Amino acid sequence: MATIITYDIPNKHREFKNEMFTLGYLDKIPDNTCGIIYLPNTSLYHPTNSAQKARDDAKAICYRLGISLERCISTIWQSWAAICGEKFK
């Protein structure tokens, strides 16, 4: 089941995202209406992980990077509404 995770970390944003990307997380999602939904900066999507797995992945990466995971919510990607966003620069 697909999951979306949103988080706050104090620093090492690029390093954190790169680690999450290696685990299959994405910062954009293909969509029939928009073509592509571009997620907010501190949100990621995974096509098959559970909400608990997403949270645990974020915690483990923060631990490895030596940063705190200040806030984190992960949930099943099910019923949603979006502003598609602009392509990342």
Image (cartoon, rainbow, N blue to C red):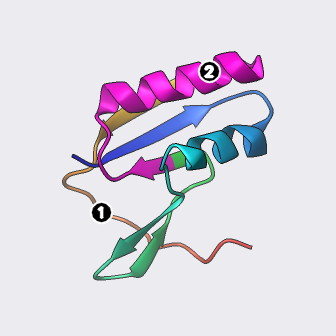
Residue type pointed to by label 2: Leu
> Which stretch did the figure color magenta?
44-69
39 is within the stretch colored magenta: no
**Residue depth check, mark 1 versus mark 2: number of the one nearer the observer:** 2
The disc, 1 or 2, on the residue closer to the chain's N-terminal end is 2
What percent of the width, then of the height, locates residue 85? 53, 72
Task: Using the rendered view, name the quadrant where residue 55 is placed.
Answer: top left
- Residue 57 shown left or right of residue 86 in the figure: left
- Give the residue displayed 58% in from the left and 47% down from the top: 22
Q: Would you place residue 7 above or below residue 88 in this image?
A: above
Task: Using the rendered view, name the quadrant where residue 54 is placed.
Answer: top left
Residue type pointed to by label 1: Ala
Kindly identify which residue carries mark 2.
Answer: 69
| Classed neighbour count for the residue bearing mark 2: other residues with Cα under 10 Å, few (<14), some (14–19), many (≥20) | some
Q: State yes or no: discs 1 and 2 in contact (Cβ < 8 Å).
A: no
- Give the residue displayed 80% in from the left and 31% down from the top: 11
Calculate the distance from the C-alpha at mark 1 to the C-alpha at mark 2: 26 Å
Q: Secondary structure at mark 1?
A: loop
What percent of the width, then of the height, locates residue 62? 66, 22
> How many numbered markers are drawn?
2
Q: Secondary structure at mark 2?
A: loop
What percent of the width, then of the height, locates residue 38? 52, 67
| Classed neighbour count for the residue bearing mark 1: other residues with Cα under 10 Å, few (<14), some (14–19), many (≥20) | few
Kindly identify which residue carries mark 1.
Answer: 81
Circle on res. 56: none
- Give the residue displayed 67% in from the left and 71% down from the top: 88
Q: Nearer the viewer, residue 18 or 75?
A: 18
- Residue 66 shown left or right of residue 88 in the figure: right
Residue sitting at the far right:
11
